């Protein structure tokens, strides 16, 4: 059996880091695909990573292309094609342009990599992953959006920064859409198995919760020209790895809900079990009335953006 194959659609900021981390994690061969105008830059990134490998002994092949035939047989496809936010923009402002792009990408992925597990990263995430699902006709267990992994990672980072304890020992869950109305479940956050509510004051927890919701925008503002790319790449690869290695990790992800949490027909951030069969299960956690109300707000927001796709 040869190596696994990972196709990256979009070889910009996130795509480049995805290629690097996938190589370092030795997940398989990597193909970076971008539009013809960007073929040379992605070939350059691929060659640069090929030349990095001897320093640490990775054996995968990394290639750049603008020809979809080169993604044939991909086990995993990660889509970052599209434009990122600029300061002052919301993720929803990207809908029109990224919707056109994802429709084109979906047709091609369907044609050239019909068996792949597809991870969508492009924003506005919940609507773009929905558009991929609708356009491609892929089964729901093989289409997933990367958002909750990143949002809960940010929440974990802030809780670790607050306490000074290891990020490794912080666990938490963020539900809902990938927007400022997402629902960090502070009640369930633990640090070393101890409820975070016992270690951090209610005021500070509230501040951390708010920072988590706005964390993407905080980085957009600092970068000045683009959005976060290191942590989104790592988060997407964590999902790819759980699929490729059948780890059955529980990762907050945008998955198609059909009744779970009372949501029907939308991709919303929920705890998903990711294994060899893709999304193997959505776990349901009992919510308080307040959490239910907060979830309803984010779901309605996502429904509004999805409505605008006309799909
Ligand atoms: N097919 C393939 N690639 C495309 C297409 C297309 N139709 N249209 C655009 N691209 C490529 C661009 O040429 C660019 O190289 O997608 C890449 C996007 O890279 P960046 O602009 O650097 O954006 P990045 O920071 O990687 O973010 C990508 O992920 O987090 C989201 O909001 C973010 O929607 C954005 C996406």
Image (spheres, grey):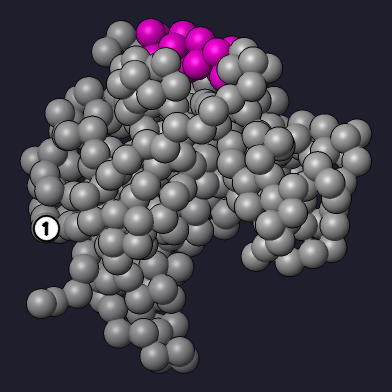
- The image shows residue 4 at horizontal and vertical percentages of 21, 68
Instruction: Give the residue at mark 1.
Output: 73
Above/below status of 299 relative to 50? above
Does the magenta-highlighted stretch encompass residue 300? yes
Secondary structure under badge 1? loop
Query: Which residues fall within the magenta stretch?
Result: 294-308
Left or right: 166 with respect to 19?
Answer: right
Left or right: 291 with respect to 61?
Answer: right
- The image shows residue 103 at horizontal and vertical percentages of 25, 27
Give the quadrant of the N terminus.
bottom left
Left or right: 134 with respect to 227?
Answer: left
Residue 39 appears in the rendering: no
Quadrant in the rendering for residue 114: top left
Quadrant in the rendering for residue 24: bottom left
Above/below status of 71 relative to 272? below
- The image shows residue 277 at horizontal and vertical percentages of 21, 50
């Amino acid at each position: 059996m040869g190596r696994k194959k990972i196709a990256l659609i979009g070889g910009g900021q996130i795509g480049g880091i995805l290629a690097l981390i996938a190589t370092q994690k030795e997940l398989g061969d990597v193909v970076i695909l971008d539009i013809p105008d960007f073929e040379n830059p992605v070939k350059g990134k691929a060659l640069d990573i090929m030349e990095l490998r001897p320093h640490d002994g990775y054996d995968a092949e990394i290639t750049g292309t603008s020809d979809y035939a080169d993604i044939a047989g991909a086990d995993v496809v990660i889509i970052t094609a599209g434009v990122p936010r600029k300061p002052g923009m919301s993720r929803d402002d990207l809908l029109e342009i990224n919707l056109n792009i994802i429709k084109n990408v979906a047709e091609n992925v369907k044609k050239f990599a019909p068996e792949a597990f597809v991870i969508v990263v492009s924003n506005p995430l919940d609507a773009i992953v929905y558009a991929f699902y609708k356009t491609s006709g892929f089964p729901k267990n093989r289409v997933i959006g990367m958002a909750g992994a990143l949002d809960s990672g940010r929440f974990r980072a802030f809780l670790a920064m607050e306490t000074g304890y290891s990020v490794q020992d912080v666990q938490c869950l963020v539900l809902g859409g990938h927007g400022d109305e997402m629902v960090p479940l502070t009640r369930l956050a633990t640090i070393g198995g101890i409820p975070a509510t016992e270690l951090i004051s209610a005021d500070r927890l509230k501040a951390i919760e708010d920072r988590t919701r706005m964390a993407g925008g905080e980085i957009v503002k600092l970068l000045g020209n683009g959005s976060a790319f290191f942590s989104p790449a790592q988060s997407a690869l964590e999902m790819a790895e759980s699929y490729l290695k059948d780890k059955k990790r529980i990762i907050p992800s945008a998955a198609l809900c059909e009744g779970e949490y009372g949501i029907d027909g939308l991709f919303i951030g929920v705890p998903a079990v990711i294994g060899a069969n893709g999304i193997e299960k959505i776990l349901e956690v009992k919510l308080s009335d307040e959490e239910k109300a907060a979830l309803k707000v984010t779901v309605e927001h996502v429904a509004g953006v999805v409505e605008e796709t006309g799909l």
